[in-house]
Structure formats: structure tokens, C-alpha cells
Image (cartoon, helix red, strand yellow):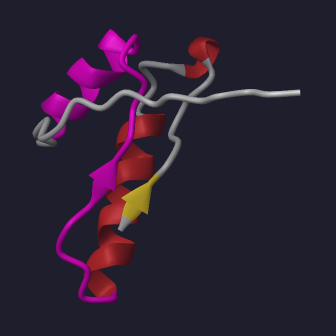
Amino acid sequence: MNILALAVNQSAQEQGIGTALIGWLEAAGKSRKIRIIRLNSGANRQNAHAFYRHLGFEEVKTQKKFVLVSD
């Protein structure tokens, strides 16, 4: 399972919403025999990274994205 974006509004954080979302996704994955959840998170989202680690996620890769815009 690949989670491309996960965010909880700052005013609603620390109420268990993010934990519940990940729990639901994990259960949905298990019911479909999906054993791995991959989650992408921007490099500057340090608080989110700590949250994901707290839930048992392990950082496996640092990645940069590059774009070229031409007229």
C-alpha cells in the first residue's frame, strides 16, 4: 500500500485522528493481504516523521525531486 499524502489539520492534531487513520489503513491492507505500507513525507515535515516513527514506521530512503520548467 502506498500512501502519497496524509495530513491532519493542525487544529485537530493530537486527538488520535492520525493514529486512527493509519490504523484503518493497516486493517484495510491486512484484509487485502497487503503486508507493507509505504508512506511518502516531505523532508521538512519533522513532526510528522516523529509521529510515523512512533507508529512503527522506519525511514528507508531519502529522496529529492527535481523539475525543469520550460516555456
> Toward which corner of the image does residue 54 lie, by quadrant?
top left
User: Which of the image's four quarters has the C terminus?
Assistant: top right
Task: Reply above or below: 5 against 16.
Answer: below
Q: What residue do we see at 39% from left, 61% from top?
A: 2
> Toward which corner of the image does residue 19 lie, by quadrant?
top left
Task: Reply above or below: 7 against 45.
Answer: below
> Toward which corner of the image does residue 29 lie, by quadrant?
bottom left
User: Does the stretch in magenta take in 49?
Assistant: yes
Q: Residue furthest bottom?
A: 32
Q: Residue furthest front?
A: 71
Q: In the shown orientation, is residue 51 left or right of residue 1?
A: left
Image x and y of residue 26, in percent: 30, 64
Q: What residue do we see at 31% from left, 71% from top?
A: 27
In the image, 17 versus 71, the foreground residue is: 71
Task: Reply above or below: 45 against 35.
Answer: above
Q: In the shown orientation, is residue 50 left or right of residue 9?
A: left
Q: In the shown orientation, is residue 15 left or right of residue 63?
A: right
User: Which of the image's four quarters has the N terminus?
Assistant: bottom left
User: Does the stretch in magenta take in 58?
Assistant: no
Image x and y of residue 61, in percent: 17, 37
Image x and y of residue 16, in percent: 40, 33
Count numbered badges in the picture: 0
Q: What residue do we see at 16% from left, 42% from top?
A: 57
Give, as a single range, the part of the protein colored magenta: 32-55
Image x and y of residue 43, in percent: 36, 18
Q: In the shown orientation, is residue 55 left or right of residue 25?
A: left
